[in-house]
Every structure is written in C-alpha cells, then in structure tokens.
Amino acid sequence: MLALGVTPSHLRAEVDAGRWLRAGRRSLAVRPPETRDRADWWLAVLECAPQAAGRDPRAALGGITALQAAGLEGVADGLIHVCAPKSSHPISTTAGVRLHETRRWRDDDVVRSGIPRTRPEVATVQAALWARSDREAALLLVVPVQQRLTSADAVSEVLDRVQRDKRRSLLRAVMLDVADGVRSLNELDFARMCRRRGLPEPERQVVVRRATGRAYLDVRWRRWGVVVEIDGIGHLRPDRWMDDSLRHNEIALTGDMVLRVPSLGLRLDPQRHLDLIERALRRAGWS
C-alpha cells in the first residue's frame, strides 16, 4: 500500500470508517473475501514476516498447498504450508500454517501470478520431503505426475538438487519407478528378497506362448505354477492396464496363479507382499 502512495493516515481512516477490514497483523481487505478468493492462503503468505527488521520477507505456498493451488485433487493434510528462504527466520501468527525455511529457495521456482506458490515440480519434491512417513512421501511423488500437474522428468530434475536428506535415496528410487525407465527395483532385486526370505529361487523373464503371441513373465515358479508380475507406475495407465489384464487372464487360463505386485509396494512394505507370495507357494505344494 505504501508503495502505491497510500499513507498511514489514509489507511487508518479507511479502517476506522469500516470501508477496509483488518485481515491480519500486516494485511487489510478492501472487501469481504469470498470462498473462491482463498483468503486463508493469501493471509498465510502475506502474514509471513521476518523476525528481524530489514530481512527479506519473501514467502510462497509450498508442498501440498502449492500443489492444491495448482489443481491437485484428493490429497490434503489440513495444514497450509508456506516456505521461505533459509535464515530469513520467518514468523507467522496465522492459525493452521506450517512454515518451512528452505536452503533450496530460488526466486525462479515461484509462480507469481495469483497467490505466490512454488512450481508444481518443486512443490512435489517439497511435499515428499515434508511428508509424515515414507508411504506418504511416495504417494506425494506419484499423484502430481498421475494428475498431470507436472512430469516425472521435471520432478527428477528438482530432486537432483537434494543432496542431504534422509529420504533422498528412497525418493530417487521411487522416481525411477514413476518414470518407468530403468527399474531400480527389478527382477534381480526381487530374487534377492526371495532368497533372504527363504523362498525358492524363481525363474526370471520367462517366455510363454499366448494365443496372441509370445509374452514375457517377470517371475515364475514353474514347478508350483505361481507367477509374479512386478508392476511399475506406468502399468496404471489405462492402455497398459487393459493389456496387463488380458495377459493376466490368458496366463491364469493355462493353470498358473498370477500375483500382481506394485514395485512401490515391494519398496515400502516388502514383507506383506512376500507373505502373500509365500502363501501362494505353500498352497501350491511348496514347503
């Protein structure tokens, strides 16, 4: 306001007359806010101030909140996440706001049209780093890509900036699955899991003949008629899902039991998936 030539006495006069409303310690509203205005998001950013006078007051929505502002659906944690540069010592008195100081702040990472917010690929990495659990972190990497708010390549590029974080290795591995490229959790990794569990050694990349031609099975125990297909994130696409379903059914009709296991599931909770595989083998006669 002061930069626009509005004087402090003018501000007081408008507030005293009831034409402008105090929205916070540092914010005024020139009209009552409407629901679509997301006044809570605006206040979370505008009310974020540095502790010491003269410090940079830059702030923006980050993490899940920035993704919601970009259109993310179906994911929320009940908080408003705001990020600010490291060592700016931001403070906020707004209820429900979680402030994050980040050493990875870059001015060009912030979208300035509308409420200041970090770009979707930056917000995706932030959300994963700030998540309450590894499961939630993996979900928050996958969903923005699935909803096409950003791309796996863009997220991976931002993730490369992360040099020190306890989840760094996990998130990099998850992104390989999201990109469905060179699988970090492949059939060889799965075979090692089976050996540690005491399960029999499976055959890998088995060629079988189908009515429509040849097919490759990820893992098969021929003696017991058990097949495991390890699905990366790419298998959730509608075209892949339909093809996988047809192949699954054709294999089942030959008498084999087919178990589908998501690669993310093996990475985040391997024991539960290995429990099911062991049950299938024992039911088929292995002991």
Image: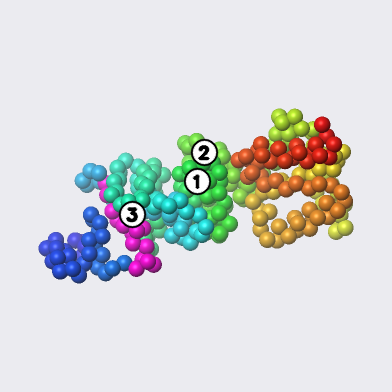
> Does any portion of residue 24 appear in the rendered image?
yes
Query: Which is nearer the eye, 95 or 57?
Result: 95
Q: Are marks 3 and 1 in contact (CB under 8 Å)?
A: no
Relative to 26, 13 lies left or right: left
Q: Which residue ends up furthest to the left in the rendered image?
A: 9
Q: Secondary structure at mark 2?
A: loop
Amino acid at circle 1: Ala
Q: Which stretch did the figure color magenta?
A: 34-50
How far across and down, in percent of the image, does residue 49 sit? 27, 49
The C terminus: image quadrant:
top right
Relative to 237, 7 lies left or right: left
Q: Main secondary structure of the magenta part?
A: helix
Q: Are marks 2 and 1 in contact (CB under 8 Å)?
A: yes
Residue at image position (66%, 55%) is: 236
Q: Secondary structure at mark 1?
A: helix
Q: Are marks 3 and 2 in contact (CB under 8 Å)?
A: no
Amino acid at circle 2: Arg
Relative to 91, 274 lies left or right: right
Q: Secondary structure at mark 3?
A: helix
Residue at image position (39%, 67%) is: 36
Q: Dot 3: few (<14), some (14–19), or many (≥20) neighbours within 10 Å?
A: many
* Nearer-N-terminus badge (2/1): 1
> Does any portion of residue 182 appear in the rendered image?
no
Res 11 → quadrant = bottom left
Labelled disc at residue 44: 3
Q: Dot 2: few (<14), some (14–19), or many (≥20) neighbours within 10 Å?
A: some
> Disc 3 and disc 1: Cα gap in Å?
21 Å
* Nearer-N-terminus badge (3/1): 3
Residue beneath label 1, please? 128
> Disc 2 and disc 1: Cα gap in Å?
9 Å
Amino acid at circle 3: Ala
Labelled disc at residue 167: 2
